[in-house]
Amino acid sequence: MTSRGSRTTESNPHPELPHFQELLDGTDWASLATPYGTGESLPAALTRLLDLDPAVRAAAAEDALGEVTHQNTIYEATVPVALYVAAILNHPAVAAGEHAHEAELQPRHPTRETLLDWLGCTAYDADDERVAMGENHFGEGFLDACPDMRAFRDLRPVIYSAVQRFLTNDNAKVRDAALIAAVPLAEHHALTRHRNELADHAHRLLSTSTDRYKRDRALDALNAWGHDTSTLKNANDIAARELRTRMDDHDLWWASNGTGEYAEDLLF
């Protein structure tokens, strides 16, 4: 049997994040589908995420996370990998060796930032917008046909509990990565109460960060939650949004014109 989920008890109806070793040992990785086969190589790569050498962890992250990442799809192995990643976020080894005095020894990205970035991207691959797109193309039974996406969505509160503590981390890169991961997780009905807190963190990110992707995600979240973002945008934000709109309009026109349908309507 495969260990995919989290524990619940009568006294604690909310699922809990399992211990990382329990996930590692209790999951039948070889039986789980990945975009490239099965997950039999995942335990070794996941274990190396706790190596004391940042370079080893960086390579392990590429091996482990790359093994379950392809074309914005949630695979069988994605769910236990996501739980494992969430379970080790606070492990001391994840940050070992990242405070070396010699600048050349410091990793370009903290391991926690890498893990949080991946959790965020995975959460966006299973967010409400992605589900709506699926239902638009395949009907209301879309999630029934995607049990792995459904499983990930059900576990969003568990993963959020691990991500939340890093919203106030001393490292700005880690703080920002935690926020961008938390935003799509907070779509879960049990997490909507956290949106005001996340909005405050989004304001902070927009006042300090120049990262284009993270700024766009923060602005999109605030807009979706009904906040006025007019005073939060800088010139680059406005230019990027205008470019995105033009590209979306062009793609829509091109797709429609290519079929020989709707072209005249779009020209007007």
Image (cartoon, rainbow, N blue to C red):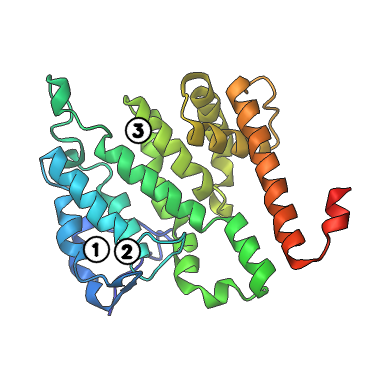
Closer to the camera: disc 1 or disc 2?
2
Residue 19 appearing in the image? no
Reading the image, the residue beneath label 1 is 23
Position of residue 51 relative to residue 156, above or below, is above
Amino acid type at image mark 3: Val
Reading the image, the residue beneath label 3 is 174
- Whole-percent x and y of residue 39? 25, 70
At horizontal 26% and vertical 41% (from top left) the residue drawn is: 90
Nearest to N terminus: mark 3 or mark 1: 1
Reading the image, the residue beneath label 2 is 80
**Residue at mark 3 to residue at mark 2: CA–CA distance:** 22 Å
Do tag 1 and tag 2 residues touch (Cβ < 8 Å)?
A: yes
Q: Tell whether 57 sits left or right of 139.
A: left
Q: Quadrant of residue 166?
A: top left
Q: Tell whether 168 sits left or right of 88.
A: right
At horizontal 18% and vertical 63% (from top left) the residue drawn is: 43
SS type, badge 1: helix
Do tag 3 and tag 2 residues touch (Cβ < 8 Å)?
A: no
Q: Residues within 10 Å of mark 1 (few under 14, many from 20)?
A: many
Amino acid type at image mark 2: Pro
Q: Quadrant of residue 116?
A: top left
Residue 21 appearing in the image? yes
**Front residue (pair 100, 200):** 100
